[in-house]
Image: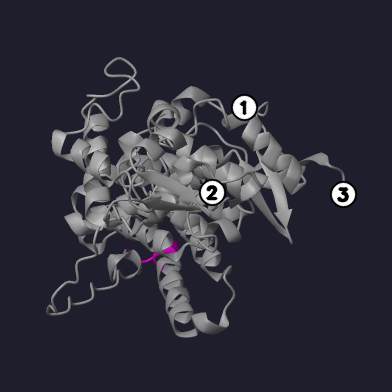
């Protein structure tokens, strides 16, 4: 293989990088788990809404994702945020909350820079290492894990204590370079030996000293403008005393822990499992005709799937998605309308008739007035990209409610 090669790859085939320094996750995690973290995004690392706005009306081919094949899987090393938007656009993943921004026009196949892992890692570091898109701890993790660099004191401190991870305001450059640098740690009674934190203090005293310093950083008592470099001086007098009194003691392996304690919950009455949504939200009673026939055929097809899904391929749900499009086209034809016009006209009234739980189901599966037509089109062309049965059921529910408005026997 060439060291670098431009290849067109379907969005559905691209696999999100689980070890992305922006927000690493278990290496065996699926795309859906990565997307869940991206949309929770408490620290605004992904900032997908801003990316979508900045992209404008269409996907820009001048910015190529960097892809490395692991066996036969194309893993996205750089460009994961853009690929997440594409996967949401085509219904390849669901999102845990309502989308409050528009995703630009996306092609189903995009050009990618396919290269070796070495080149991909060098490219990722060059683009993000000093650009400000990574925080210091993320950069240190990347350099050690992927570039073979020694662990920094900042990384060792976090790995041993969980201090930085559990106090995100500490994850900034000046804290790493001016406060938790090795000579300052030594002056406070902490040393690094064999890649671990050692301390002259008891674990309780060491915890109190680091906690005190953390509070001073978070409150900006010490910053680039206030008490700069005066790490010992900003400590409370009782902690200054501990540092001074313990200075002559022999260092020992520290077991200081800033990670939250997991609280065991008392045994509670187990929750009743929520009722699984039925296709179309239940039985429909439609006027006799082609649309009613298609509805009944789809219901039978779904029942076949439920009883045989263990022996069917993962592509089978795509057949139901395709059938839903045929059903909508038939219903629209009955009303002398085009499918997109028909669905848009009745969508809001249909949604109003649904209860809040069902509305939440639609939102969680990205089924909206603006997305439903695209989801139906996707299902007609790509079996794999329409294999999400939960989303298909959500689509069927709103379609069923629309049919109840336009084709119900009670409307004769």
Q: What residue range appears in magenta?
A: 287-292
Q: Which residue is mark 1?
A: 60
Is 206 inside the magenta-drawn segment? Answer: no
Disc 3 and disc 1: Cα gap in Å?
26 Å
Give neighbour class at mark 3: few <14, some 14-19, many 20+ (Cα, 10 Å).
Answer: few
Height in image: 280 above or below 100?
below
Q: Which residue is mark 3?
A: 1
**Gap between marks 2 and 1, in whole Å?**
22 Å
Closer to us: 308 or 134: 134
Dot 2 corresponds to which residue?
377
Residue 143 lies in what quarter of the image? top right
Residue depicted at 44% across the width and 25% down the height: 53
Q: Position of residue 324 (x, y in %)?
A: 46, 59
Q: Nearer the viewer, residue 86 or 212?
A: 212
Label 1 SS: loop
Q: Nearer the viewer, mark 3 or mark 1?
A: 3
Q: Can residue 410 be seen in the rendering of this structure? A: yes
Q: Position of residue 353 (x, y in %)?
A: 19, 53
**At x 60% / y 50%, what residue is drawn?**
145
Q: Is residue 367 left or right of residue 18?
A: left
Q: Earlier in the sequence, mark 2 or mark 3?
A: 3
26 displayed left or right of 366: right
Residue at 53 percent of width and 38 percent of height: 139
């Amino acid at each position: 293989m060439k060291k670098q090669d431009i290849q067109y790859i379907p969005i559905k085939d691209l696999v999100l990088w689980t070890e992305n320094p922006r927000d690493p996750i278990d290496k065996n995690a699926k795309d859906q788990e990565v997307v869940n973290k991206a949309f929770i995004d408490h620290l605004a690392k992904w900032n997908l809404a801003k990316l979508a706005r900045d992209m404008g009306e269409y996907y820009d081919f001048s910015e190529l994702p960097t892809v490395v094949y692991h066996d036969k899987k194309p893993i996205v090393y750089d460009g994961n945020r853009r690929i997440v938007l594409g996967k949401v656009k085509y219904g390849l993943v669901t999102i845990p909350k309502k989308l409050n921004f528009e995703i630009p026009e996306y092609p189903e196949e995009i050009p990618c820079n396919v290269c070796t892992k070495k080149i991909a890692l060098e490219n990722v570091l060059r683009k993000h290492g000093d650009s400000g898109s990574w925080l210091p701890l993320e950069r240190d993790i990347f350099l050690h894990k992927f570039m073979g660099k020694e662990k920094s004191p900042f990384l060792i401190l976090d790995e041993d204590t969980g201090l930085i991870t559990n106090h995100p305001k500490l994850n900034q450059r000046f804290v790493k370079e001016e406060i938790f640098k090795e000579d300052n740690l030594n002056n406070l009674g902490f040393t690094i030996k064999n890649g671990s934190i050692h301390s002259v203090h008891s674990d309780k005293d060491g915890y109190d000293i680091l906690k005190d310093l953390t509070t001073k950083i978070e409150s900006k008592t010490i910053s680039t403008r206030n008490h700069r470099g005066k790490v010992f001086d900003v400590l409370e007098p009782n902690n200054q005393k501990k540092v001074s009194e313990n200075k002559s003691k022999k260092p020992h392996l520290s077991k200081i822990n800033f990670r939250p304690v997991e609280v065991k919950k008392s045994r509670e009455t187990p929750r009743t499992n929520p009722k699984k949504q039925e296709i179309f939200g239940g039985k429909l009673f439609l006027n006799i005709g082609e649309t009613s026939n298609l509805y009944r055929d789809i219901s039978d097809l779904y029942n076949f799937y439920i009883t045989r899904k263990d022996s069917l391929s993962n592509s089978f749900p795509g057949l139901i998605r395709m059938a839903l499009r045929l059903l909508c086209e038939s219903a629209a034809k009955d009303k002398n309308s085009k499918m997109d016009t028909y669905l848009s006209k009745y969508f809001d009234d249909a949604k109003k008739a649904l209860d809040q739980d069902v509305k939440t189901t639609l939102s969680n599966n990205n089924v909206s007035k603006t997305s439903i037509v695209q989801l139906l089109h996707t299902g007609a062309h790509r079996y794999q990209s329409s294999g999400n049965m939960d989303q298909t059921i959500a689509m069927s529910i709103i379609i069923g409610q629309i049919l109840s408005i336009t084709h119900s026997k009670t409307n004769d």
